[in-house]
Image (cartoon, helix red, strand yellow):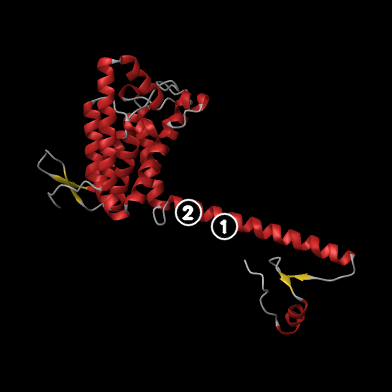
Amino acid sequence: MSLSFPPFTRWVKRLIIICAAVYFLKVVFERIAPQIEGALELYLGLVPAAVVHYGFIWQLVTYSFLHAGLTHLLLNMLTLWMFGSQEEQDWGSRKFLEFYFFCVIGAALVTVGVSYTGLPGLSPLSPTIGASGGIYGLLIAFGMLYGDREVLLFPFPFSIKAKYLVGIIIFVVVVATFQPSQGGVANFAHLGGLFFGFIYVKFVRGRGLLFGLSERYFSTRNRYYRWKRKQAAKKFEVYMRQHDRKVEFDEHGNYIPPDEADSHKTNGGSKSGWVN
């Protein structure tokens, strides 16, 4: 266990500055122009009905930069600093940022989904604000990756292993989620952040989400082009037979010149000159 404070890593520092600046603007507008402050929360907070019916998809991200009060902001930013800095140091800035917003957006999607279930206390018109979706994702990732690390429960004079601390937090969140009087639909954002954080660490973290998606895209594209080439080769074979000429293609749709086609039949053949 170390009593030193974690460093302010690149994107942890930037996220804290952005959230603090947005909160400052929110407080200023609340004092001098309440109508602007209300519009800020309406257009940047997460309102499920606005996302579904009016296409305000930016709210799936922007809600994480708004906070209801100073205590809400300080607790989220402190947690972001204490746990996020270690993860950004180990993963690098790009993967950390990808993970953080994966949890933020995942928590928002869960919130939108459950708001239409008709459960007591839940409504698609209820706004949700705060970085808690991303923060809870960071927490479960820390518990999974650094579970045996001791965490000092400042200001209390004792420490606890990270995996037990995260387990307690998950228990509290699950219990609070089904008590609408303790937070309503916003609690599902916490659960969504936990769930998507677990999914990322368990299945995506190795190469990252963007790499996996791009790899799948190029793999699908290449399979499509190979299929098109094979279909074109079959049509060309039919066309040439109709004109009393014979051409051959291999199983990938690559043209086999006549001299190579003969060797193909006698000694197992060689590779075509057309290779994908």
Vertical arrangement, residue 264 with respect to residue 28, above or below: below
User: What's the mark number on residue 195?
Assistant: none
Vertical arrangement, residue 79 with respect to residue 67, above or below: below
Kindly identify the amino acid type of the residue bearing the numbered disc 2. Gly
| Residue 125 placement (x, y as % from top left) | 43, 20
Which residue occupies the foreground of this view, 115 or 240?
240
* Callout count: 2
Which residue occupies the foreground of this view, 107 or 157?
107
| Residue 115 placement (x, y as % from top left) | 45, 26
- Which residue, given by chain and number where applicable, does mark 2 sit on? 212
Q: Residue at x 37, y 36 (%)?
A: 191
Q: Residue at x 71, y 84 (%)?
A: 267
- Which residue, given by chain and number where applicable, does mark 1 sit on? 219
Vertical arrangement, residue 258 with respect to residue 51, above or below: below
Tell me which label, 2 or 1, sits earlier in the chain.
Answer: 2
| Residue 163 placement (x, y as % from top left) | 26, 48
- Give the left or right position of residue 133, taking residue 110 as reference: left
Q: Residue at x 45, y 34 (%)?
A: 109
| Residue 251 placement (x, y as % from top left) | 70, 68
- Give the left or right position of residue 60, taking residue 84 as reference: right
* SS type, badge 1: helix
Q: Residue at x 44, y 32 (%)?
A: 58
Which residue occupies the foreground of this view, 197 or 24?
24
* SS type, badge 2: helix
Vertical arrangement, residue 102 with respect to residue 215, above or below: above
